[in-house]
Amino acid sequence: MIKTRPYRQIAGRYAVLVAVLTAFCASPAGAQHANQAGLQFGDTHFVLRGSSENRLEFLPAGELDEKNWSEMLTLVYVPAATATADLVWVKSNILSHYQGSGTIYRSEQIERAEGGDHLIVAQIKRGEIIEVIFTRILMYDEQGLAVVFSHRFYGEEQFDVVDAWFDVNSEGVEATLLGLHEFPLAEQG
């Protein structure tokens, strides 16, 4: 029997996701936990710099400034998403959040042997900060997971630099993001 949820129940759960992209993360015994975690992304090793119950933030090794970073990897677990079909609602809410702050370059479903992942590529502007964001949404450890790679630019007049960086790096970032298969889990609170 297929487990379904009423539309309002799903929409209500993901309204919280839009506001803070947070929920509660359960971590099974034997899983790699965040305090032991590091992630390799292309040629760069990322180390854990911050976490909450369901959110892990990684900066490149050696980059210590958590407020003025250039690249960040963020893992956001969404335990309310328990089936591949729920990822559509996660994607929809993330898209809505990004559209309110910037431009969507692309949004698509990626068919994979283990199920359909979703990919969102966007540019967000907040004050004098511009971020190019690549978000992969997938099922992992029986729950939804948003894996977010952000590259940040500082300064009001950076659009030409952003476009040049995107033209040179976007294909490689996407391939690396889609190539990740193992992720650390957040500590259970």
Image (spheres, helix red, strand yellow):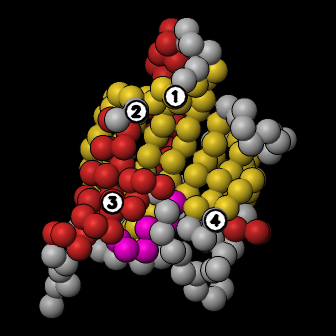
Dot 2 and dot 1 residues touching (CB under 8 Å): yes
Q: Which residue, given by chain and number where applicable, does mark 4 sit on?
A: 52
Q: Nearer the viewer, residue 166 or 76?
A: 76
The CA span between labels 4 and 1 is 23 Å
Horizontally, residue 28 falls left or right of residue 87, namely right
Callout 4 crowding tier (Cα within 10 Å): few <14, some 14–19, many ≥20: some
Callout 3 crowding tier (Cα within 10 Å): few <14, some 14–19, many ≥20: some
The CA span between labels 2 and 1 is 7 Å
152 versus 10 height, above or below: above
Say whether disc 4 or disc 1 marks the residue closer to the N-terminus: 4
Find the magenta span and give its range. Answer: 76-81
- Give the label on residue 15, or none: 3
Quadrant of the frame with the N terminus: bottom left
147 versus 102 height, above or below: below
Amino acid bearing label 2 = Ser
Quadrant of the frame with the C terminus: bottom right
At a point 54% along the width and 81% down the height, the residue shown is: 26
At a point 79% along the width and 39% down the height, the residue shown is: 65
Q: Which residue, given by chain and number where applicable, does mark 2 sit on?
A: 101
Amino acid bearing label 3 = Ala
Horizontally, residue 54 falls left or right of residue 107, namely right
Spot occupied by residue 128 in the image (x, y as percentages of width and height)? 58, 20
Horizontally, residue 144 falls left or right of residue 93, namely right
